[in-house]
Amino acid sequence: MLIFLCTLIIHQHHTKAENAICRLMGDPKHPLLSKDGDITIGGLFAFRMIETLPSLEFTQKPEPLSCSSVNLRDFRLAQTMTFAIEEINRSETLLPNISIGYKIFDTCASRLSAMSATMALMNGQEFAAGDRCNGQSPIHAIIGETESSATVILARTTGPFKIPVISHSATCECLSNRKDFPSFFRTIASDYHQSRALAYIVKHFGWTWVGAVNSDNDYGNSGMAIFLNTAQEEGICVEYSEKFYRTEPEKLLKVVNIIKQSTAKVIVAFLTSSEMSILLEQLYIQNITGLQMIGVEAWITAKRLITPTSFRVLGGSLGFSVRKLDINGFSDYVIKAFWDTAFQCSEGDGNSSQNAVICSKYQDLLVLKNYNEDVPEQRYSSNVYKAVYAVAYALHSLLQCKKQEGCEKNLTIQPLQVVEALKNVNFTVKFGDNVWFDNTGAAVAQYEVVNWQQDSDGSVQFKAVGYYDGSLPPDQRFVLNPENIIWAGGQLEKPRSVCSESCPPGTRKAAQKGRPVCCYDCITCADGEISNETDSNNCQQCPGEYWSNTENTECVLKTVEFLSFTEVMGIVLVFFSLFGVGITVLVAILFYSKKDTPIVKANNSELSFLLLFSLILCFLCSLTFIGRPTEWSCMLRHTAFGITFVLCISCVLGKTIVVLMAFRATLPGSNVMKWFGPAQQRLSVFAFTLIQVLICVLWLTISPPFPYKNMKYYKEKIILECSLGSTVGFWAVLGYIGLLAILCFILAFLARTLPDNFNEAKFITFSMLIFCAVWITFIPAYISSPGKFTVAVGIFAILASSFGLLLCIFAPKCYIILFKPEQNTKQHMMGKTQTKSY
């Protein structure tokens, strides 16, 4: 590597240039292509890809570095640079009477050679004895490098000397730092835009689970860092993020194994074409195919990757590429004019010993002399073309060029002046693009979205399926045509790449412990909760009167439950209620038809008919408990129940008292019946009933029963029931009935042993025993029964107690009337016959 001490002395010790003597240390490094001119532009391109290091044992002077394996792409870029310079030199409007020369070096895709070439550009090649350094750079600008890492080295080296560097393809976001790289420019956009666009394309196709591989250099590391940050913002999970460099085979194998074992079907490959080439080879060897590759401009349109086997791995790849622009006249130039001007030798001249020395340094390039099939696919050529013209326009303004008068040739142009002039350039090239640099020294982000497709003849084509234009409004920058895309493996259907399948409506996502957020389980929403969208993070609680449907996708009105006339239970209860009414009516008819018989007259027939009437009302009041509760029905059912049952028990109590009074009346000298005659009996029934009526009126006045939607007992349905309003009123009504029933039971129990063939007190005792048992059992059953069963229990208690009274009191009498008419006599009733007593 050449080191020229004069530049170091100028930079580090700040001595005056005219006092420093320049001396050449080592052998000079000559450019591969060069041409003299009034102004010189440098160029750094990787003409070859493989560098061979000499022996470094230092037992003898090391041989110069040697390079091999022609890199056709960079060779075309160098041709583009010379083409643009020749075009400018012929122009009458741009830099008139000023010729541009060039010195183009081969960097051999090596950082070592790139550094050597950079130092050679910054210094002259030959010095006469005693020459002094003039402090002037021999070049005014440098076009290059191709790769970002090499460009970082170049820009850092030239930065202290303010020599402008314009790259055509170095996209690393790190180069946007104007503090570190104040004199760097590029005619391509920063990877900041491409990296974010990669995340957008992944999100656009619904891929939330991807792998990531990048080159272990400035280009790959910077670009991948931006992609990972953007992916996190967009909700994309990265299963793995690995990196390797072309000289690290162990890391490469590790990356391939990780790809092989992963579940992600999409890989974002932020690689240079060199790293992609060796990764492609290993993927093919291990038969890893069917993965959807998402690529970057560095390799997505690289012709070198197209091999007979590469389509098995890279077929269907998607990625961003530099727009393909046709430079008019360039195709003809690379066939003839270039070889006549730049390479002034031919294969035929190689027999001459003199020409053999001149031509030997690019002997391997001569085979490309008649090859130009790749020219239309050269996507970076337009960037080199713009870079050369940008320098020309900057110099045009600095040299105060005028169309008729030409340029000021005597002006001394410092590199820093060129840097400042480049910041202000704004022009349009012949193929229509407007060229200018933003505040980071980069161009506007404009990409084509290309897709690896195979034609019918088996050739691989890079088909444009969309674009990204950073100059447009945000909602118009990214356009894709999915119908034109061929996917990995030649499939027409888009691949799926997710860690977990989407959670359907009715479920929510539950993160898996220790895994990325894209990995989750789908948990069904709890009852009463819904999710009506895919991949819902939470379930929503339904409002009070709503409940979730069976799929948990929407809230529906809760089922309203009440005991209705149409359901089986309601029909059965209505039947027994009407059956009780019918039986009671038949008994009443029978008694009315036999009203003059002794058994009907006994114990006051008037009370018997009133009791039968009250029993009919008791059976009918049970119907008020069936049906949809309303404000009126709630008040009616409780008051009707309370009043009718008090009426019924009052009648039974009256009959019991009559039995007792009748026995007292048979004793000598007793005149008790006059105190409890028919008028008193009617009055007692009325009085007992009136008390219950007053209790009910007071209850309805203070806090009456009302319909109530009970949503606490069942979560999934509403129980429509009658709220008691005042619980004190309810228990007062029930307690009064119970008080009368107990009193009646006690009196009947005391009169059960009275001597009579037909002692009615016995039957009243049984009836009151059943009545009390039913209602004592009713209370806990009523409290514990849910929903409509509460009402059913109440109706059952009413019917059971009513049937108990009807059967116990009237069934024996009906039996005698219908089947034992001989016992229906006054003598038998008075116990004066020898018949079995009942």
Image (spheres, rainbow, N blue to C red):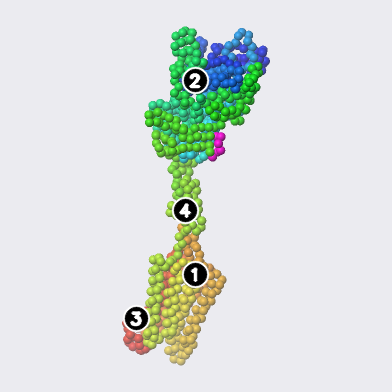
The residue to which callout 2 is attached is: 333
Q: Give the range drawn in magenta.
A: 470-475
The residue to which callout 1 is attached is: 634
* Badge 4 or badge 2: first in the primary sequence: 2
From the image, state whether disc 2 or disc 3 is nearer to you.
2
Q: What element carries label 1?
A: helix
The residue to which callout 4 is attached is: 554
The number of numbered discs placed on residues in the rendered structure image is: 4
Amino acid under disc 1: Cys
Measure the alpha-carbon separation of dots 4 and 2: 70 Å
Looking at the image, residue 705 lies above or below residue 196? below
Residue furthest to the bottom in view is 669
**Residue drawn at point x = 40 percent, y = 84 percent:** 754
Residue furthest to the front in view is 404
Q: Which of 163 and 574 is in front in this view?
A: 163
Percent coordinates x, y for residue 109 in the rendering: 50, 21
Measure the alpha-carbon separation of dots 1 and 4: 33 Å
Circles 2, 1 touching at the beta carbon (< 8 Å): no
Give the image quarter of residue 389. Answer: top right
Q: Is residue 601 magenta?
A: no
Q: Which of 432 and 395 is in front in this view?
A: 432
- The N terminus sits in image quarter: top right
Circles 1, 3 touching at the beta carbon (< 8 Å): no
Measure the alpha-carbon separation of dots 2 and 3: 132 Å
Looking at the image, residue 166 lies above or below residue 359? below
Measure the alpha-carbon separation of dots 2 and 1: 103 Å
Measure the alpha-carbon separation of dots 1 and 3: 39 Å
Measure the alpha-carbon separation of dots 4 and 3: 63 Å
Amino acid under disc 2: Tyr
**Residue drawn at point x = 43 percent, y = 66 percent:** 564
From the image, state whether disc 4 or disc 2 is nearer to you.
2
